[in-house]
Image (cartoon, grey):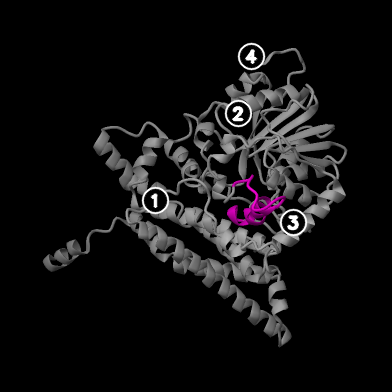
Amino acid sequence: MASDLPPPYTAMTRHDMMPRANHDETARFNFLTHFNRYLSGAIGGGNKLAYDKRVLPAFRETHGRDPEHRYEIRDAMNEDSWHRNWSALKRNSMEMRQHNGRQIVLRQLDELDAMAAKLIEQSGILELDPSVEQPPYQTAVDIHCQPGGYHTEERENDVTVGANYDVGLFATTGGALGGSNDGGGQAVVGWVKAERPDWRPRRILDIGCTVGHNAVPIALAYPDAEVIAIDTAAASLRYGAARAAAMGVRNIKFVQASGEDLSRWADGHFDWVQTTMFLHELSSKAMPRLLKEAHRVLSPEGLILHVEQPQYSDEMPLFEQFMRDWDAFNNNEPFWTAMHGQDLKQVMADAGFARESQFVAGVRAVVDPEIFPPSPDDGEEDFGRAAIWNAYGAWKDPVTSIEPAAAV
Amino acid sequence: MSGADDGLDWVALSGKRAKGKRPEYFDEPALDRLYSTVFALAAEVSALRDRQDTIERLLEKNGALSREEIEAYVPDRQAGEERGLATRAYMGRIMRGFQQELEAMEADDQPIMDIVERLKRE
């Protein structure tokens, strides 16, 4: 019975930059952890039931056919009382998570900013570039309903948005990412170590790193490598650098830069280019630009790896696509639906990664099993949230002269 | 713990809205507001229950307590599971209406009047 209970928030790993949650703030996160699990588990099946029992039959009655696109299901389900109730609950759980996280962070912001400034100065691992503009896909809405997004400052040089992201991710994911929210990065490390046990990458680029929770485990697993973690958002990088410094990581640098413009790095500079749950935060024009740049800076025989939720395909039932789309419309993830509808292998091929060099692998969060229960095996249980992902990757062709277009 | 020195109002700032139009889930906007309030209150009741449990455990162990001890309390594995189970049971109580609506969708009960009529006949 107890084995599948979510772990208490106090199981989170503490480092000097982690905002200190008091007793009741901790308890609020515990409530939200249970609330999220309840919504996806105990009553998550209600959406399918409502669809099968009444929404689909009514659609057939009206249209004389089955839905042909996930948006048709969405329109129909948005009229259904169960789905409205469930969505309202889930939206509120996101908003409550943000509110609680911001209360924790903002009430101790002086201490956090001072600690960050000290750690950043001592470590020297932060490099900001104010000339980097925030791309429109990052500013159109506040992604994940996180007030201020990843980039907004509450005051000069503060760490609010990064700290809030880190402090509440545990509750959003029901603890599935482990004590340092690094289950994704740990999963990537586990996959690469199993795939190429003797590989020794020298330089690693993590694009869209936010607070570095997925880049840090890579740096720790490859202590001889130099990890560059980039993001356009200084407010997140500032916290990320201080966090990494507090965790004692030395071989990482947080650099303000856009993945669409990696011109500061020479062709073939990196042995490994990584994105983790990031491609869906871009736009249709930005994603191919970023991938072409990633291809350019990747060394021959280097590894590119994107961790994402599964892409939609004709094999995926439309209802599942609709459920996986929920965050796009209800949790401010506006590129999610278009991105997951794309043929990522073709997009990768257009960027220069020959199809025969590409692969898709399944990875799941790696967490301490003593503290954290495994993510549910049934991927349908928590559409778009389960800590089970697909890794879309390629080992770059050793022939360096291939032009991106020629490789299609 | 008192917020920022430069007069930054952490209580007001923490409630900032996320940019992006919020979906309207119900035809009656008051219902959307009510959901937000009800579940914020549900979280507070849950937090109060945790706090009471903490106080009871500390008193049982030490016979006395300080507020610092409450704030610093970290449940051990067994206590964490007991509290987790209690929170799950609490969740079941406040969510019963939703859970039973789901069961009702599965059950396809007839209207009660149909049964009233049938029992009158049979």
Q: Which residue is mark 2?
A: A287
Q: Amino acid at mark 1?
A: Glu
Dot 2 falls on a residue whose secondary structure is: helix
**Looking at the rendering, in which quadrant would you find the C terminus of chain A?**
top right
| Circles 4 and 1 on the same chain | no
Dot 1 falls on a residue whose secondary structure is: loop
Of callouts 3 and 2, the N-terminal one: 3
Of callouts 4 and 2, the N-terminal one: 2
Dot 3 falls on a residue whose secondary structure is: helix
User: Between marks 3 and 1, how big is the CA–CA gap?
Assistant: 37 Å
Q: Amino acid at mark 2?
A: Met
Q: Which residue is mark 4?
A: A405
Q: Which residue is mark 3?
A: A113
Crowd around label 2: few <14 · some 14–19 · many ≥20 (10 Å): many
Left or right of A62, for residue A220: right
Q: Chain of mark 4?
A: A
Dot 4 falls on a residue whose secondary structure is: helix
User: Where's residue A188, x and y in %?
Assistant: 71, 39
Judge depth for marks 3 and 1 and give the one in front.
3
Q: Chain of mark 1?
A: B
| Circles 4 and 2 on the same chain | yes
Between A145 and A387, the one nearer to me in the picture: A145
Identify which residue is drawn at 45% across, 68% down.
B94
Q: Is residue A6 above or below residue A121?
A: below
Which stretch appears magenta? A149-174
User: Between marks 4 and 2, how big is the CA–CA gap?
Assistant: 16 Å
User: Between marks 4 and 1, how big is the CA–CA gap?
Assistant: 45 Å
Q: Which residue is mark 1?
A: B24
